[in-house]
Image (spheres, helix red, strand yellow):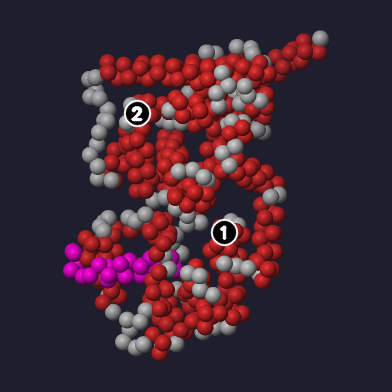
Amino acid sequence: MKYLNKILRAKVVQGYEQGKTDEEIADSLKISRKIVVEIKLLEIACKLSQGFTELEIAERFHKPIEEIHRNKHNYILRRFSDSSSNNSISEIPPSSRIDSISQQIGGTKAYVLEKIIIQKLKKMENIEDITKSVSISLGETKKIIENCAIRKICEEGYTLEELHKMLHLNLAENPRVYNIYLEVKKENESGEKGVESRRQNEIINFYKENRKDKLEEITSSELNKYLINYIAIQRKKGKNIEEIAQELNRSHKTIRMIIAQFIISESSKGTPKQHISTYLWLTTAQMKKNVYNYLTVELKANTMQHIAWLNSSTFDQIQLMYIEGALEMKKSIHKMRPNKDSSKKLAFLKRHNKEEMKKIRVEFIQGLENKISHEELIEQLKISRPNAYRILNLEIARSIYQGFSVLQIAERLHKSSISIMDKKHAFIQNSFKRHSDIPLIAENIGCSEDYVMEKLVVHKLKIKKNIKNISESLNISVEKTKTIIEDYAIKRFIKDIHGKN
């Protein structure tokens, strides 16, 4: 078989590593595209049997991870069913075919057998026909399916619904699988992990059902955290963006926007691209394209400076991501930074954006005071959900500093007291996580830097961080941290005494 020639295989793989398409490789090597694709499928099968992940293979071959996922076991199934051999396929025993495939991909016979059975199940073939085709007993087939299901539950967090959809399992006939699922579920629902899991499920359900009343009580950071985590989990299960969007009852554009904003946010914080890529189960090329498409849409209505502000990033960071995406997609580059000597233009843009955002903040708060919902205001003012929550959190922080009570703020903004209490110092905490610029936070609220520092120290104490860690995170001495805590304790003591009197 020509495509098994090691030199030819190496040249095809080299072509993919250089970013060439199937057609370009076929033309350069003067072979048919069919042979190129067959070699690609063989290489994917080999790498998977060696323990490489779909993401690692996608990066190496410069292909979307969805393509690798879709074709990951096609070589095994095609070779098992291939009738292009000189001998009729029916004349070659299944065990011999499986043995031949395992030698070609460097995997075990058990590995090949499992992949054949699972792929046939996905194609809706019944167990009896599958058993006959691979020439093993019905009991062995069921055991292979059960073991695969248990691995999916324990290692990948599959639900019963997802297993049924994938393997068409009848749980009434598989008590072993069902009992293990219950054990894993019980373990996941216990302790802190269980609380976190239940909270995520609750918020995701609110989001799916578009429960505006409940969503308004959730901070943007918490909502985005659970949404991104949900998206990441589904990606690792092989679901594409369109499937995830359908599950969440949103458009694929909305899901892509959430992903792009997360990539920008994490990149701006200095998180390595490889970490973001592994978490979202996207190749670096896919991430660049996603961000580029998001920025292209945003640039139709906003300046790059304004987009940087919206995403808690800098002009330079956004510009770099835009250029990387444009180069990845082989697009011409627009909306670049003005020349270095155009400082007046930069100053104007900065002032203009500041004035524009001030106007948006005023209109947003006035809207809340007039009982207009969050969603309506987001649509009217054409702002993102994270930005809307940032404006709300800033207004709450300012009002608290000015001496208004939680109840007074809740009544003015038509929110529950509980939601205001949860967001009391959210602006300070979230802003510090994003950029650690205490003077800027103080300027935004209109308070002193000492006030911001006190709120950060107290918050970190409440989440049980020790004084040394708090001091290091805020870049202050342990003595100063202790002084802040002592002053706060005295103020609380005096306030409590006055409250009792």
User: Badge 2 is on which residue?
Assistant: 301
40 within the magenta span: yes
Residue 212 sits in quarter: top right
Residue 162 magenta-drawn? no
Q: Mark 1 — residue?
A: 162
The stretch of residues the image draws in magenta is: 27-49
Q: In this view, does 439 lie to the left or right of 186?
A: left
Position of 404 compared to 295: left or right?
A: right
Q: Which residue is drawn at 48% across and 18% down?
A: 363
Q: Examine the residues drawn in magenta and state their main secondary structure.
A: helix
Q: Position of residue 80 (x, y in %)?
A: 41, 78
Q: Which of 350 and 252 is in front in this view?
A: 252
Q: Which residue is drawn at 66% across and 25% down?
A: 416
Give the mark nearest the N terminus, 2 or 1: 1
SS for callout 1: helix
Residue 425 visible, this angle: yes
Alpha carbon separation for disc pair 2 and 1:
40 Å
> In the figure, is residue 205 to the left or right of 53?
right
Q: In this view, does 319 lie above or below 480?
A: below
